[in-house]
Image (cartoon, grey):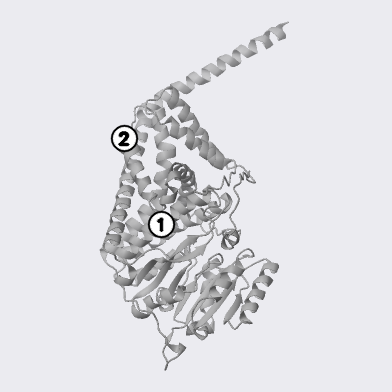
Amino acid sequence: MERLSSAAIIPDSFIGARDDIFMQFGLVWNMIKEPLIIPLLRMAVAMCLVMSVMIFAERLYMGVVIILVHVFGRKPEKRYKWEPIKDDVELGSSNYPMVLVQIPMFNEREVYQLSIGACCSLTWPSDRLIIQVLDDSTDPTCKAMVERECQRWAGKGINIKYEIRDNRTGYKSGALKEGLKRSYAKNCDYVAIFDADFQPEPDFLSRSIPFFVHNPNVALVQARWRFVNNNECLMTRFQEMSLDYHFKIEQEVGSSTHAFFGFNGTAGVWRIAAINEAGGWKDRTTVEDMDLAVRASLKGWKFVYLGTLQVKSELPSTFKAFRHQQHRWSCGPANLFKKMVMEIITNKKVSVWQKVHVIYSFFFVRKIIAHIFAFFFYCIVLPATILVPEVTVPKWGGVYIPTIITLLNSVGTPRSIHLVVFWILFENVMSLHRTKATIIGILEFSRVNEWIVTEKLGDFLKNKVGAKAPKKFRLNIGDRLHFLELAVGCYLFFCACYDFVFGKDNYFIFFYTQSLAFFIMGFGYVGTIVPTS
């Protein structure tokens, strides 16, 4: 009987213990809230407001510049001397400079035929053009397929070289570097680079090379990417919105004001002499293209962005591929900034204004602050102010400036303006991965040099032949749960509930929808209904 009575008392003791735990938690919270939590949160809010003003000023500046560029018609053809290269009866084809076209590949069985075919169809004298396929594939079947395709074009009279390596040292930069060491490459003046999913138009060289011929200080001509699978799913539409802003605004502004911008790694032409003077390709980061561009600019070379020259390409259409790509694009610049900031400061060949542009605008605000602010403000700090009502965020910092920044960011793709709310939610989720990658790049953690080739599915083949993808619902659960997204989603959901019951800021709708976005990504969602408008 004593045992039974003791057992009967146990549930009450558990209840008491539970109440004690909540009471103790409340006491501890009240003890640390005033001296610790509130000051730290106020400091975090102040830092986020400063970062928002920095981003707002940067976006506003670029908006003003792009308006002036269009009003005054500052096209590249007017800022630089440009004349088409004409046939010469006496000189013949020797009037054209020697051009090398490099196509780096790694297990690209879905797209290799399209990229090789497009490059072999470039309008340029055959004896002044060399196509170089740099195949680092580890799949023997894929390797054999690419080699046969090169042989097929060689049989048509195209000067095409198939190059392989024993190892993948340096990844893409290593392949490009080795390609330039070939004896036939040393006779070339310029090198055009196209990733395996890029398809240049036949007139690509005839429109880009004249900038080099008539302007000896030009090192790079960058073309704009055109996305052939942008309507495949909402995720590709969101990518289109972000990349359109990058090309139409950021690249255009950099080219028009400082003759500097980051090389996009593909769909561009380099003066080989500029590559050599800058120190050649380096594999110290995962953004070898940006690394080369910064080093060349510090030598005084000029860059030209040609927005009217567009090259077809494919966007990542799976969340896994997109995450890997964004990790590389966020980690690499942060790591490169750490490695080069002192070299930029001490450089003697460029002006102080250009140094400020590269360090502050190009690197610090766009590559570091923009990622960190988006995640910490919208997903951590702003929700925390709901739990600590003593700390408030002014309306201009929580509503007005973010709204203006969003509108400025979405001007690059007017056709998708109706998707801007969903785009914001998606970008906030991705800001988690970009922030993590940025921190890895700055602190040089283990994944700092992780290089995973972006998966290409070859879906643009259907678009090329005019077949429209049917509307369908595609929901895939990933191989594993993404616990970090789920954790942030739970935090936002709790803040939304708390704001709905106790809060006065009325942010709960935003927190609810943002938590839903994190839950969707956390469970491995990679597609949605195909948007056609």
Q: Position of residue 150 (x, y in %)?
A: 62, 76
Identify the amino acid type marked 1: His
Q: Give whichever of 247, 137 is nearer the camera.
A: 247
Left or right for 354, reference 530: left
| Residue occupying image coordinates x 44% and y 31% | 509
Assign a secondary structure to mark 1.
Answer: helix
| Residue occupying image coordinates x 43% and y 65% | 263
Q: Position of residue 409 (x, y in %)?
A: 38, 50
Packing grade of label 2 (10 A; few <14, some 14-19, many >=20) is: few
The dot on residue 246 is 1
Assign a secondary structure to mark 2.
Answer: helix
Left or right for 142, reference 455: right
Quick check: can you spot residue 442? no
Query: Is residue 399 placed above or below 530 in the rendered structure?
Result: above
Q: Position of residue 99 (x, y in %)?
A: 47, 80
The dot on residue 395 is 2
| Marks 1 and 2 close (CB-CB < 8 Å) | no
Identify the amino acid type marked 2: Lys
Q: Quadrant of residue 67?
A: bottom left
